[in-house]
Amino acid sequence: MHNYTDGRAKFDLQEKIGSKSWTNITDRNDTIPPRAQDFKSGQHVGYVAGNKREFHLIVDGSMRNDEWLNPYDEVAYKITGSRCIGSCVEEVNFDVAAENRARYWSNPLDWKDEDGEGEMPEEGGEIHILPSWNMIYDLDGPSPIYELVRINGNLTFEHGKDLHFRAKHIFIRAGNLILGNETHPLEDEVVIELVGERNAETMVYDNAIEAGNKLIAVVGRM
């Protein structure tokens, strides 16, 4: 048996008593009393801040006399968890012109953005290829293992050498991952290695779509 645990940014709880309509009772959060003998069905509490992501709901058949007029009514609960509040991916300004120069992965200065921020990625780092960038991947030997590589510009693998690129997630969102084309075909040995653990955090695109680990997700072009 594998225990799969995942996080949610918020929870919504609805309750339906007998023939009545569904009622959202999320705003009754933090209603679980400290003593078990005081538990009533529908009491709940959610923790969504920091590293604690839990939802506790009491379902034990005990009646709340203020609402359950008929003790024989069937009661149902519907819990909806949202991975994100708002968009699950960061907002990016795509209305920018492409730079007229190439940036090289191995050059620390080429990781600076227009504000002078940014540094060369290291093991476990998250990487963002900005919409205006034309980044050339040119590292010798196996790369560090990157946590997430987001491609909104162009990431091109350098020709004329063997390359070994390692990452847990590669998200080609609005950009391009280029290994070769019709006029410059790939003639070198290029390895793209996806690394990860079974219970590592998944990639989320919106509240309806999420993907597993060790993946290349393509929305742009590869």
Image (tube, rainbow, N blue to C red):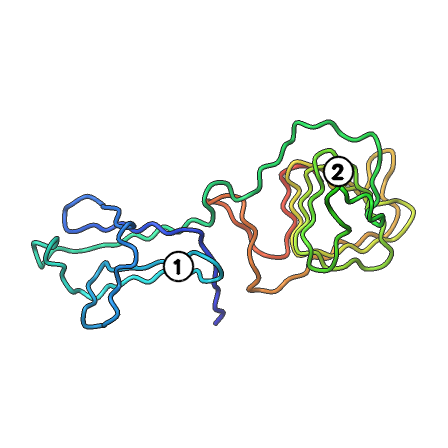
Query: Residue 15: x percent and y percent?
Result: 23, 51
Badge 1: residue crowd in 10 Å (few <14, some 14–19, many ≥20): some
Are there few (<14), some (14-19), or many (20+) residues within 10 Å of tag 2? many
- The reply, left or right, for residue 210 in relation to residue 39 is right
Q: What amino acid type should be assigned to the residue bearing mark 1?
A: Tyr
Residue at position x 82%, y 52% in the image: 190
User: Quarter holding the C terminus?
Assistant: top right
Foreground: disc 1 or disc 2: 1
Q: Residue at x 52, y 44 (%)?
A: 88
Q: Label 2 near label 1: C-beta < 8 Å?
A: no
Distance in Å between CA atoms under marks 1 and 2: 40 Å
Relative to 165, residue 180 above or below: above
Q: Residue 47: which numbered mark, if any?
A: 1
Give the farthest residue toward the left.
Answer: 70
* Residue at image coords 18%, 72%: 37
Q: Residue furthest right?
A: 160
Q: Which mark is residue 184?
A: none
Q: Secondary structure at mark 1?
A: strand
Find disc 2 in the rendering and name its residue.
Answer: 154
Element type at mark 2: strand
- Percent across and percent down for residue 133 are 76, 36
Q: Answer left or right for 179 relative to 66.
A: right
In the rendered image, which quarter is residue 59 located in? bottom left
102 versus 213 height, above or below: above
Residue type of the residue flagged with mark 2:
Asn
Residue 207 as seen in the image, left or right of residue 213:
left
